[in-house]
Image (spheres, helix red, strand yellow):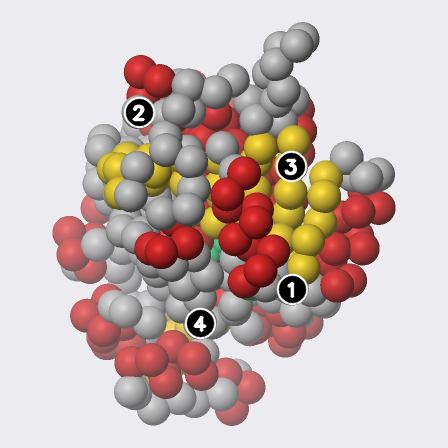
Amino acid sequence: MRVGIPTEVKDHEYRVGMTPAAVHALVQAGHQVLVQEGAGLGSGIPDTSYREAGACLAPDAATTWSEVEMVVKVKEPIRSEYDLMQRGQTLFTYLHLAPLPELTDVLLRKEVTGIAYETITDAKGLLPLLTPMSEVAGRMSAVVGASYLQRGHGGRGTLLAGVPGVPPGDVVIIGGGIVGLNAAKMALGLGARVTILETNLDRMRFLDDIFQGAVTTLASNHHNMIAALRRADLLIGAVLIPGRAAPKLVTRAMLRQMKEGAVAVDVAVDQGGCFETTRPTTHSDPIYIEEGVVHYCVANMPGAVPRTSTFALNNATLPYALALANKGVRQAVLEDPGLLDGVNTYAGHITCEPVAESLGRPYKPLLELL
Ligand SMILES: NC(=O)c1ccc[n+]([C@@H]2O[C@H](COP(=O)([O-])OP(=O)(O)OC[C@H]3O[C@@H](n4cnc5c(N)ncnc54)[C@H](O)[C@@H]3O)[C@@H](O)[C@H]2O)c1
């Protein structure tokens, strides 16, 4: 198969669809990979690395898109890329089609096979291509929170580690999933006292086991949350109810009970956020202060560390890209129901039910089309 890797063009997107190692794996398997010149620079990967891995370099986006059967990207195509898509092409990337009727129309009109990273499932029903970004965002949340606790950054001037004779700071994490676990790891590493509020008792047992009692797990209810918020120096929002907007677990009135200069990082901001006071911010203007609490609510946190994020994403996407290239889309999805879940558009139809529902469009099961 001929596979194309264009440069990402979305604002402030520095990741790239394939690393040289992934390109090498595809080339070893007998495929041709065309990488747009400069595609890896945002992630610190020079063109020479791709050439050494066996890729051919294309001078521009038009060439990269026009000469391949499958395009591997990071973000959904934006308007300037619509005309570049080829009829019947396969597009393997984050798509997030539910709020994007215009892009969906282009994919349907051009009969593009749109395979979305975010809807691929694994044997446990989890979302394996979202996990790496939750790991990145979770680990970042403790680090950025610690940084904004500095007085010069608006925080209360607490060093999370404390020092001999002065107690460490308190980190309170709401939601002990992938983000929460990774936030806890980092916060513990920084020397903080860590509390995780969860609703899932089995998950709390798991967290208690792996942290061997080093974190406190608490049932997530109003009473426990108020008590935890009052002592928190750093609050991290990490809840998810799959497919739904995040519940507003921390109201403005609850936030008022936090210490002046405490920091609140709402990682769940991409699902609307779990604090009433959350509004999305950007890497160029990441914080604001409400009720005396510094809020950090950046919706694409992994974008700040594109190098790590690119490599983490590729570790998860490569097996699927290889299966698609080796077997072709039809055979690959017939053999892997999790990959089949990733196919959002096929032969001019929407083949992902939640996307069709969100857009109010007809849904066609993929198996009826294959
Ligand atoms: N801002 C970013 O850049 C960024 C990056 C990656 C992920 N995210 C977001 O972070 C959020 C968490 O992702 P994840 O991968 O950790 O999800 P996850 O499903 O692994 O974990 C969510 C956890 O929240 C728990 N939960 C649900 N309701 C709760 C409640 N009322 N109280 C306490 N816990 C509750 C669940 O039991 C689960 O363990 C998602 O909204 C995700 O989209 C944001």
The label shown at residue 194 is 3
Relative side of 106 to 227, left or right = left
Tag 3: residue type? Val
Which residue appears at 64% of the width and 74% of the height? 337
Of callouts 2 and 3, which one flags the residue occurring earlier in the amino acid sequence?
Answer: 2
Which amino acid type is marked by label 2? Gly
Residue ID for mark 2 = 154
Q: Secondary structure at mark 3?
A: strand
Left/right placement of residue 259 relative to residue 217 reads: left
The residue that appears at 27% across and 43% down in the rendered structure is 290
Could you give the CA–CA distance between mark 1 and mark 3, rounded to whole angstroms? Answer: 17 Å
Spatial CA span between label 2 and label 1: 32 Å
Q: Judging from the image, what secondary structure is the residue with disc 1 in?
A: loop
Instruction: Identify which residue is drawn at 30% across, 87% down.
Output: 361
CA–CA distance in space, label 1 to label 4:
16 Å
Give neighbour class at mark 4: few <14, some 14-19, many 20+ (Cα, 10 Å). Answer: few
Foreground pick, 1 / 274: 274
319 is higher (above) or lower (below) than 301:
below
State which quadrant residue 225 falls in.
bottom right
| Closer-to-camera residue (69/75) | 75
Question: Does the Cβ of the disc 1 residue fall within 8 Å of ligand 1?
Answer: yes
Instruction: Check the image and report above or below for 140 versus 134.
Output: above
Question: Which residue has dot 4 on it?
Answer: 244
